[in-house]
Image (spheres, grey):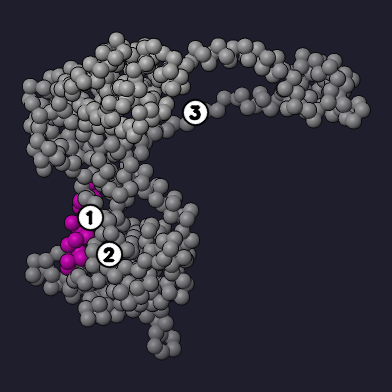
């Protein structure tokens, strides 16, 4: 197409020479009022074609194209005098982009659009929890701009460059902001702040550009389609027959059925090859079938009292918890192993240790701290359970990092105690309390919950749940569910002798792709040994 234009248009007879001389076009486009010089290109157009590139674009009927903020570079290299229609088309489009980009933001000073960052590996969108800076405030690198609620926690977002916060695009409390979407504007000069009072990010107006391009071709398409639409309308009537091609009826029977709002599918035909005739429709109407079929509709129309309810919006943590747990149950083959452990000796050791803690001014040690320590040591003894599944291999971790399930008003969090097998009970207790408090305050950072290899969930101590089965936290291969301790009557050493002991039920949920049944049983045996002989944990 371009070669025909070059050969037959008087206006473009010198374009081949123009392309030979100018081998590359590089345009720097800013979102501010600084206009890179296009004098060389414009002069060539005016001298060779008697009108400028802008006039040429307007004659071609192109639509407005909005430039995104920032700096972009367009470069086209021609290796031959006539590179063909494709390069010619790219050359024209590059001129169009540059001219429209200058005119769209000519009144704006230099600025920077700050987008929603990806603050965790699984984050696709976030919410603005709180702005710590106001419009007009000066910002410096390292200062916190706002708090962003991610899919796991609330994280502080720091400023990367020095300047002034000119515009807050997404107000405090804005939800479901996609990663990369503009949330604020910063400028270098304080005097430029007022110019962004009514500013709208270029990304909001970006989709309008592609819609404007096909505008010139629409009239042509309409002209072609209009005459074709008439035959289609004529053909569409008989084409409705295939939907009823299995129901044969005479025209008179069909009309009688339509007049009485009777579906032909409910009438049994007595004509040749089951064809429905007029008599069949009349018999159907006389039998009262129409009245009986109308009765259920009246019952359906009966008024049902409206339910009283409240719609609670999803939080980010609730969305992520739902998607991850659904993914776990749908893709991980769970199986469950339950064992009862006697905790009398563990409770006795805990009492002794707490007396030492109180004497030294330390915090008390909880049953959960002892459970975490026992689970970590059991993972070190049976490392197959400290693994995760991938499509190519099973990854066995050398670090024993225990996630601890913490329930808060905002949802379920699983902060991690790293290298729990190497830490003492008092250290584990302090870390669990500190992380649980941060979870309740919704101030966990990614390093507080990422990197876990095994999870412990305890509903026994806080809630008195006897036994339950937990859902595996992917990509981990197992999770331990802790039930409550209860007193039971057990046989004594001699005949007719009975003792009372406290037993706690624990259930291990395993990924059968990683942990075979015998391996899971071996881990529970090791865990039970540490609980029932707690002194061994101190070795």
Q: Quadrant of residue 207?
A: top left
Say whether disc 3 or disc 1 marks the residue closer to the N-terminus: 3
Q: Residues within 10 Å of mark 3 (few under 14, many from 20)?
A: few
Q: What is the secondary structure assignment of the residue under circle 3?
A: loop
Q: What is the secondary structure assignment of the residue under circle 2?
A: loop
Residue 453 coordinates in the image, percent (x, y): 32, 63
Q: Residues within 10 Å of mark 2 (few under 14, many from 20)?
A: many
Residue marked by disc 3: 306
On screen, residue 214 versus residue 38, left or right, reads right
Residue placed furthest toward the right: 272
Q: What is the secondary structure assignment of the residue under circle 1?
A: helix
Query: Disc 1 to disc 2, how far (Cα)?
Result: 11 Å
Which residue appears at 23% of the width and 64% of the height? 418
Query: Disc 2 to disc 3, how far (Cα)?
Result: 50 Å
Q: Nearer the viewer, mark 3 or mark 1?
A: 1
Q: Is residue 125 magenta?
A: no
Say whether disc 2 or disc 3 marks the residue closer to the N-terminus: 3
Q: Is residue 431 magenta?
A: yes
Residue marked by disc 1: 448
Question: Does the image show residue 345?
Answer: no
Q: Quadrant of residue 125?
A: top left
Residue marked by disc 2: 401
Q: Which residues are magenta?
A: 426-442
Q: Which mark is residue 510?
A: none
Q: Nearer the viewer, mark 2 or mark 3?
A: 2
Which residue appears at 28% of the width and 68% of the height? 400
On screen, residue 338 versus residue 295, left or right, reads left
Residue placed furthest toward the top: 50
Residue 91 coordinates in the image, percent (x, y): 33, 25
Query: Disc 3 to disc 1, how far (Cα)?
Result: 45 Å
């Amino acid at each position: 197409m371009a070669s025909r234009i070059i050969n037959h248009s008087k206006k473009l007879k010198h374009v081949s020479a123009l392309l030979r001389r100018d081998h590359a076009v590089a345009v720097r486009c800013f979102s501010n009022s600084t206009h890179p010089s296009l004098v060389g290109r414009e002069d060539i157009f005016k001298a060779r074609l008697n009108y400028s590139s802008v006039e040429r674009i307007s004659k071609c009927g192109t639509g407005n194209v909005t430039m995104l903020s920032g700096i972009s570079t367009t470069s086209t290299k021609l290796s031959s005098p006539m590179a063909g229609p494709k390069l010619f088309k790219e050359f024209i489009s590059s001129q169009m982009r540059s001219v429209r980009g200058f005119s769209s933001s000519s009144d704006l000073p230099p600025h920077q659009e700050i987008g929603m960052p990806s603050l965790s590996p699984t984050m696709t969108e976030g919410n603005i929890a709180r702005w710590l800076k106001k419009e007009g405030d000066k910002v410096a690198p390292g200062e916190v701009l706002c708090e962003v609620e991610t899919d796991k926690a609330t994280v502080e977002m720091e400023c990367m460059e020095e300047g002034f916060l000119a515009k807050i695009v997404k107000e405090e409390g804005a939800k479901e902001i996609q990663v990369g979407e503009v949330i604020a504007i910063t400028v270098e000069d304080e005097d430029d702040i007022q110019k962004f009072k009514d500013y709208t990010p270029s990304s909001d107006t970006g989709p309008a550009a592609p819609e404007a391009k096909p505008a010139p071709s629409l009239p042509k398409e309409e002209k072609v389609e209009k005459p074709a639409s008439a035959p289609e309308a004529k053909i569409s009537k008989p084409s409705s027959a295939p939907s009823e091609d299995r129901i044969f009826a005479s025209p008179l029977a069909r009309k009688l059925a339509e007049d009485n709002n009777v579906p032909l599918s409910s009438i049994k035909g007595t004509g040749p090859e089951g064809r429905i005739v007029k008599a069949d429709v009349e018999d159907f109407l006389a039998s009262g079938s129409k009245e009986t079929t109308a009765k259920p509709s009246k019952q359906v129309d009966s008024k049902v009292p409206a339910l009283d309810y409240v719609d609670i919006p999803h939080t980010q943590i609730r969305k992520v918890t739902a998607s991850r747990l659904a993914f776990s149950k749908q893709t991980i083959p769970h199986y469950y192993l339950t064992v009862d452990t006697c905790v009398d000796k563990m409770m006795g050791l805990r009492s002794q240790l707490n007396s030492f803690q109180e004497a030294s001014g330390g915090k008390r040690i909880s049953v959960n701290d002892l459970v975490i320590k026992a689970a970590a040591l059991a993972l070190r003894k049976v490392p197959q359970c400290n693994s995760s599944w991938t499509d190519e291999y099973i990854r066995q971790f050398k670090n024993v990092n225990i996630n601890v399930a913490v329930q808060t008003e905002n949802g379920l969090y699983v902060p991690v105690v790293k290298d729990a097998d190497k830490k003492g009970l008092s250290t584990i207790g302090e870390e669990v309390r500190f992380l649980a408090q941060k979870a309740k305050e919704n101030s966990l950072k990614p390093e507080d919950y990422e990197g876990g290899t095994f999870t412990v969930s305890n509903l026994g101590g806080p809630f008195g749940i006897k036994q339950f089965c937990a859902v595996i936290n992917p990509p981990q291969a197992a999770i331990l569910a802790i039930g409550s301790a209860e007193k039971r009557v057990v046989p004594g050493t001699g005949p007719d002798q009975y003792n009372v002991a406290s037993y706690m039920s624990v259930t291990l949920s395993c990924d059968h792709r990683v942990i075979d049944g015998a391996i899971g049983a071996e881990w529970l045996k090791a865990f039970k040994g540490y609980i029932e002989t707690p002194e061994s944990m101190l070795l």
